Structure formats: structure tokens, C-alpha cells
Amino acid sequence: MIHYQLRCTTTGEEHAFDGWYKDSAAFEALLKARLVECPVCGGTEVGRALMAPAIPKKGRPARNAAAPAEAPPVAPPAAAPPAQAPVAAGPMPAQLRAMLQRLRAEVERNCDYVGADFAEEARRMHRGESERRGIFGEATDSEAEALREEGIAVARIPWVPPSDA
């Protein structure tokens, strides 16, 4: 993985942000395809910013140096319930809302809405009884878990109001 400090000049202002990429070739390919977007304004006029080199202090190992082997982590007891992810409190940041609105628009543009029949349509597609395509709709937590147990990949997306609402 490679970490870059990036800057966007789309709006004339310089928005600074960072990104992690598989390698420099992957970053360059994404940049050339205009797939690197500014999280502030969504612009694609993005380039690398000047970065300070990571030079370790004397006596400290470099970041990329192999760390000493540690004991493997102890697995939690089998009877322990799965940990729930913490829920953030407060208003959603504008950048996150804008990205989720763009994601919603892409899903609505490229996938079929199947409503409350989501779980059953996903099963039909999985069994080959229905054409495989992108779908979205509603499913309960238990329906989503049952689909996962059957080997059907599903994901939940925070569904924010559209940007034109």
C-alpha cells in the first residue's frame, strides 16, 4: 500500500486530503481515468501534494521494517455475542452526506428496485431462476443474515435523501 497527500484544484481552492492505493501504478491509472475524487467538492482535478519523507529517528526502526513477531491474538470465547459497531452521535458531516447521495444516485441509475421482495429476488438470482443484475430494496436484519448464510452477498447502504430533495 502507498499513501499519498493529495490536493484538488477543481474549484480554484486547494482542498487537501490523503489517499491509500495499492501502488503508484494503481494511483496513476485511477488518476488518468479521473476516478480520484476530492471528498470536499467531488472534483477530479487532483494531483499529488508535496510530502515529507518518512525518515526514522536514530535508534528507531523504519516504518517498513519488519516488526518483531508477536504472539497470535487470543480468540474470544465461542459463546461471546458478536460485538456491535459503535454508532456515531450527532449530525452527519456534509462530505459524507454528499458521497452517500452520489452512491444512492448510482445505485438508482444502475440497479432495479425490488422493494420488500429483495430477499426472495436475491435468492431467485442466486439459484439461476432470474436474470443476474444489480438490485436494491428492503430486507430485515434476519433476512439479510439468512441470505449471507446461504452464500448470497448483500450489503447495507445508509440511505440518505437524494441531493435534489
Image: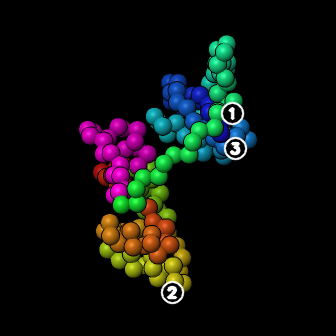
How far separated are the C-alphas under marks 1 and 2? Answer: 51 Å
In the image, residue 65 sits, relative to residue 132, either above or below, namely above
Looking at the rendered structure, the secondary structure element under dot 1 is: loop
Asked whether residue 18 appears in the rendered view, the answer is yes
Q: Nearer the viewer, residue 151 or 156?
A: 151
Q: Which mark is residue 66?
A: 1
Q: Secondary structure at mark 3?
A: helix
Q: Main secondary structure of the magenta part?
A: loop
Badge 1 density bin: few <14, some 14–19, many ≥20, Cα 10 Å: few
The picture places residue 10, in percent across and down from the top left corner, at 54, 32
Identify residue type, mark 3.
Answer: Ala
Quadrant location, the N terminus: top right
Between the residue at mark 2 and the residue at mark 3, the CA separation in whole angstroms equals 38 Å
For the residue marked with disc 1, what is the amino acid? Ala
Q: Which mark is residue 129?
A: 2
> Residue at the location (50% across, 24% down)?
13
Question: Which range is magenta?
Answer: 80-100
